[in-house]
Amino acid sequence: MKYNKQLIIFIILFSVNNFYGQSLDDYIQLAIKNNSSIKAKQYNEQLAEEKVQSVNTFANTQFKMGVYALQPETRVGNQSFKIGVAQQFPWFGTNKAKKEWQISKVKLANNNTRLSQKKIVYQVKQSYYDIYAQKAIRKILEENKKILTTYENIARGALQNNKSTMTDILMIQLKKNELDSKIQQIDNVILTLNYNFNLLLEQDINTQISVPESIELSKNITIKSVDEHPSLQNNKEMLNVLEKERFFIKKSSKPKFSIGIDYISVLERPNFIDNNNGKDIIMPQISLSIPVFNSFFKSKLKQIDIQKAAVNSINIVQKNTLQSALNNAKKQYKNALIEINFHRKNTSTTDTAIRLTLKSYENNKIDFEKVLTLQLEKIKYQINIIKATKKALIAKAKIAYLTA
């Protein structure tokens, strides 16, 4: 029995340690590892890399064999059958150009993976800060519920000295019930957020998410340029892909040549004396394939020019959009800090007003209605601090997403 108790205590301590061991960075790494969208992009990378390996292969080697139905008669004998082999080769440098084109596609696929990773990091931070805010608000409500219980006890004691009324006690109980209702609602919200967060991480939906009780905010944050954002790098890589494709198409428009050899079996002529009688024929061959009608290649080159112009236009729009979003995120971060400072001052002032009101209990009847009004105002300011903190954290996450 003693052994079982020790085992249970060990399991509880181990579970608690695991529960609080997860940080935001841990969740981010887990999301990057598990996310199916990122895995799909990584498979595209592997596919692009595999295509690079298949570039240096040549066209199929041609083997041909034929038996003469009517054997051609020559001076040295009849031709009985013919065997040939030929191999076609692209123009010099064509395979190299194609390989460079495929390598540029690998870089583009790699950049797409980076973009997916940045998106999932931002989503994880958003969801994490949502959970943090709800749990922090719940804690505020629980603490204030305890304070209202203290007020209720004071009111019951003051009732005996005619310094309070039963109405004061009932009014305090009504506010406690109101806080209870809000706490229950928040519990449901946290449950949903926890569920969605686990879906985002693609882990067990019943896993409890741990968040810190408070998160410190710095007044100044380092902000870099949007130029290194993966979406803009995608455009840069796409232009590189198109340029490599253009070079490959130009090489592909060059002639192709084949090298081969034919072997012809010759039968000996009877009663014919000659050193070449029945001598087989070996005929090396070389052929050239010239694209006389090259409108196909001209059209492909024109299509690439159009695509490059489109990518350049898209790049301008995306950069302006990112810059605008960055400016808004910076503004939201600064405004959130101002809002936090404002509500903290109001919280402190409200605390002072509550203390002064309660101090009057020494000589006068307590104005519980005023105390409750002030306490509810304080709750509002405390909750607004949490909401503003969440705004600042999400704005900071957005800034990180938009910049390198």
Image: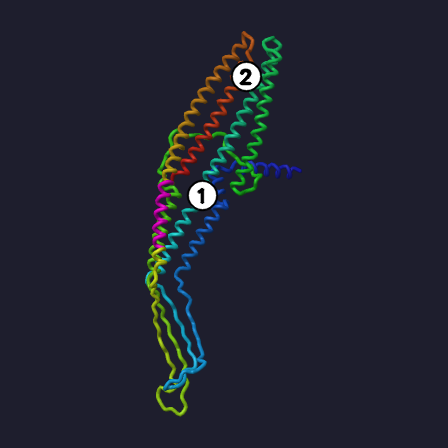
Please provide percent x and percent y for residue 246.
34, 54
Residue at which label 1 appears? 117
Q: Up-down: is 136 above or below 276?
A: above
Secondary structure beneath disc 1? helix
Question: Residue pushed farthest top?
Answer: 363
Residue type pointed to by label 1:
Gln
Instruction: Look at the picture and state if 340 lies above or below 84.
Output: above
Helix, strand or loop at label 2? It is helix
Q: Which of pointers 1 and 2 lies earlier in the amino acid sequence?
A: 1
Amino acid found under the numbered disc labelled 2: Leu
Q: Main secondary structure of the magenta part?
A: helix
Quadrant of the image containing the N terminus: top right
Q: Which stretch did the figure color magenta?
A: 300-317
Query: In the image, which disc is placed on residue 364?
Result: none
Q: Nearer the viewer, residue 173 or 150?
A: 173
Where in the figure is residue 135, as x and y percent of width and height?
53, 30
User: From this viewpoint, is residue 14 visible?
Assistant: no
Crowding at mark 1 (Cα within 10 Å: few <14, some 14-19, many 20+): many
Where is residue 160 drawn, in percent x and y? 62, 10
- Counting from the top left corner in percent of width and height, residue 8 is at 62, 38
Seen in the picture, residue 78 relative to 369 is either above or below; the reply is below
Residue 261, visible in the rendered structure: yes
How many angstroms separate mark 1 from mark 2 (CA)?
48 Å
Which residue is drawn at the image coordinates 59% and 24% (left, top)?
A: 180
**Residue of label 2:** 372
Q: Is residue 250 above or below residue 134?
A: below
Q: Which of 75 and 11 lies nearest the eye of the viewer?
A: 75
Crowdedness near tag 2: few (<14), some (14–19) or many (≥20) residues, C-alpha within 10 Å: some
Camera-side residue of 223 and 358? 223
Q: Quadrant of residue 62?
A: bottom left
Q: How many marks?
A: 2
